Amino acid sequence: MNEPVLLTPGPLTTADSTREAMLRDWGSWDAAFNALTASVCRDLISIVGGEDSHVCVPLQGSGTFAVEAALGTLVPRDSKVLVPNNGAYCQRIVRMLGYLDRQAVVLKHREDEPADPARIDAALAADPAISHVAQVHCETGTGILNPLPQIAAVVAARGRHLIVDAMSSFGVVPINVRDIPFDALVAASGKCLEGVPGMGFVIVRRAALELAIENCHSLAMDLHDQWAYMQKTGQWRFTPPTHVVAALRQALDLYAQQGGQPARLARYSENCATLVNGMHALGFRTFIDAAVQAPIIVTFHAPADAAYDFPEFYRRVREKGFILYPGKLTSVDTFRVGCIGAIDPEVMRRAVAAIGASLKEMGVILRSAA
């Protein structure tokens, strides 16, 4: 493959067979496509063991669309939402709640600090009006993994409702409804399942969704309406992303053939270790502690050298076959490298070599980025 490898958190590099699945056209109301959608939804629910209690509602658009749909559908308009905030995607949830005219209570954390279950518990105890907690599982802005099992236990013990943004963890980090109770979990086709972008989905507790009739601010994003229509007809309400669904069907088949969640976690973990070890050997420092690093994307401090310029660095690494990701932090100069997609540790070794060669060409000397 001559195209650059995407070392990003989605879109990402996909398998040839996944791309080839998009070569067929589908009728959006055709029975074969309806069966395809139903099979995808069944498999997504099975990943979290929610067959008896949860339903899967697919939605056209990016993962952000699905997060906003979940908040707008499941959070009553007079409710209050606690948002543990340790990064850019937590901040995006807060912005969404503002647009939705839902009250947000922001529990501020440092960007290199995982969300603290004890502080969440204290916030819920202090404010009985908080009905929901919106928790990002893996904060893609840094790569930090928040302790979802402990947070879910706290929320459940307080009798509140949990909405999980699992965009960058679903299918890799173990999540099961028996161990991690949640009202809704949101993810997307173009992340760790290694499909292509264009379809978000919400795995939602059926009882919670049944109570959310006519609650949503938007017709297009009304998950209850989408679910009810699909239950009745088997069809999407509005034009579906047919080729994206077909690609996801193939990606899920590969996911199962390759060993499912344990195998995906093992490969991504090896990718991550290969990347971090190689970058450390070059002289780079990671932004967050290894104990809370998800094997999804790694944030590195930028070189503290006047010769370093990210756009030029990016260009040179791209010419060598790899696309990096800019930093998402406002206070620290960083860049990010993804570990996910249809790639293996050998790809990561070649990426590290390309990074080292690019810095040498630029005359960048790595030293402390502090």
Image (cartoon, grey):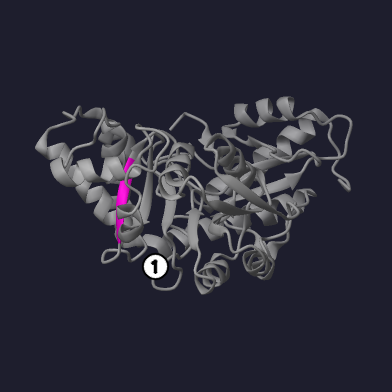
| Placement of the N terminus among the 4 image quadrants | top left
Q: Residue at x 40, y 67 (%)?
A: 176
Q: In front: 263, or 54?
A: 54
Element marked by disc 1? loop
Magenta stretch: dominant SS? strand
Q: Is residue 55 found inside the magenta-colored segment of the image?
A: yes
Count numbered badges in the picture. 1
Which residue is painted at 59% across and 46% down in the image? Answer: 103
Q: Which residues are magenta?
A: 54-58
Q: Where residue 162 sits in the image (x, y, percent)?
A: 49, 60
Relative to 89, 50 lies left or right: left
Viewer can see residue 167: yes
Residue 316 at x, y percent in the picture: 68, 27
Residue underneath mark 1: 177
From the viewer's perspective, is residue 42 above or below residue 96? below
Task: Give left or right: position of 353 versus 214.
Answer: right
The answer to whether residue 7 is visible is: no
Vertical placement of 247 versus 311: above or below? below
Task: Give the residue at x 48% y 47%.
Answer: 343
Residue 251 in magenta stretch: no
Residue 75 or residue 334, whichever sits in front? 75
> Residue drawn at (57%, 67%), measured in percent from left and top?
151
State left or right for residue 169 relative to residue 146. Answer: left
Q: Amino acid at mark 1?
A: Val
* Circle 1 residues within 10 Å: few <14, some 14–19, many ≥20: some
Quarter-of-image position of residue 133: bottom right
Q: Quadrant of residue 216?
A: top left
Residue 343 vs residue 326, the one in the foreground: 326
Residue 183: image x %, image y %? 42, 59
Q: Is residue 1 above or below residue 167?
A: above
Res. 257 image quadrant: bottom left
